[in-house]
């Protein structure tokens, strides 16, 4: 990972909850943006585009039951 300019992230020993939120997000990303579209082999540029589009979708469009069936953006706007 380092040779590709990436920083790895691992939970502290005995604390599996460190990355729970990100692991959940990555699970949604993979199942909704890649697996459901049957995407297998793509360039790094295409992966970047798909991920950026999914982040926008996740934050601005995708409703979440725990947020009273609002998107995170709508929920934040309602709270503020």
Image (cartoon, rainbow, N blue to C red):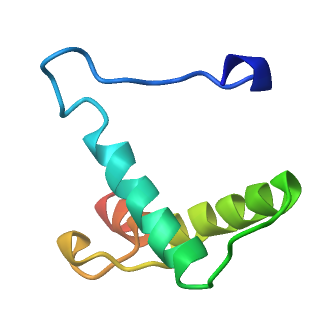
Q: Is 41 left or right of 79, judged from the image as shown?
A: right
In which image quadrant can residue 47 be found? Answer: bottom right
Q: Toward the viewer: 15 or 57? A: 15
In which image quadrant can residue 43 be found? Answer: bottom right
**Quadrant of the rendering where the C terminus is positioned:** bottom left
Q: Toward the viewer: 76 or 80? A: 76
Q: Residue at x 42, y 71 (%)?
A: 74
Q: Residue at x 87, y 55 (%)?
A: 45
Query: Measured along the vertical axis of the image, is residue 53 above or below residue 3?
Result: below
Q: Residue at x 22, y 78 (%)?
A: 65
Q: Toward the viewer: 4 or 70? A: 4
Q: Is 14 left or right of 8, judged from the image as shown?
A: left
- Counting labels gives 0
In which image quadrant can residue 17 be found? Answer: top left
Q: Is 23 left or right of 8, judged from the image as shown?
A: left
Query: Measured along the vertical axis of the image, is residue 63 above or below residue 9?
Result: below
Estimate the x, y position of residue 71 in percent, counting from the top left.
40, 73
**Quadrant of the rendering where the N terminus is positioned:** top right
Query: Measured along the vertical axis of the image, is residue 68 above or below residue 8?
Result: below
Estimate the x, y position of residue 58 in percent, counting from the top left.
50, 68
As drawn, the residue found furthest toward the left would be 14
Q: Is 10 left or right of 69, judged from the image as shown?
A: right
Estimate the x, y position of residue 66 in percent, counting from the top left.
19, 70
Estimate the x, y position of residue 16 in percent, counting from the top left.
18, 31
Query: Measured along the vertical axis of the image, is residue 64 above or below residue 1?
Result: below
């Amino acid at each position: 990972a380092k040779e590709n300019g990436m920083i790895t992230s691992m939970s502290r020993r005995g604390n599996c909850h460190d990355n729970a939120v990100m692991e959940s997000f990555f699970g949604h990303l993979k199942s909704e943006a890649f697996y459901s579209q049957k995407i297998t082999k793509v360039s790094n540029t295409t992966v970047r585009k798909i991920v950026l589009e999914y982040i926008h979708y996740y934050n601005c469009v995708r409703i979440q039951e725990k947020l009273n069936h609002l998107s995170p953006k709508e929920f934040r706007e309602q709270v503020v």
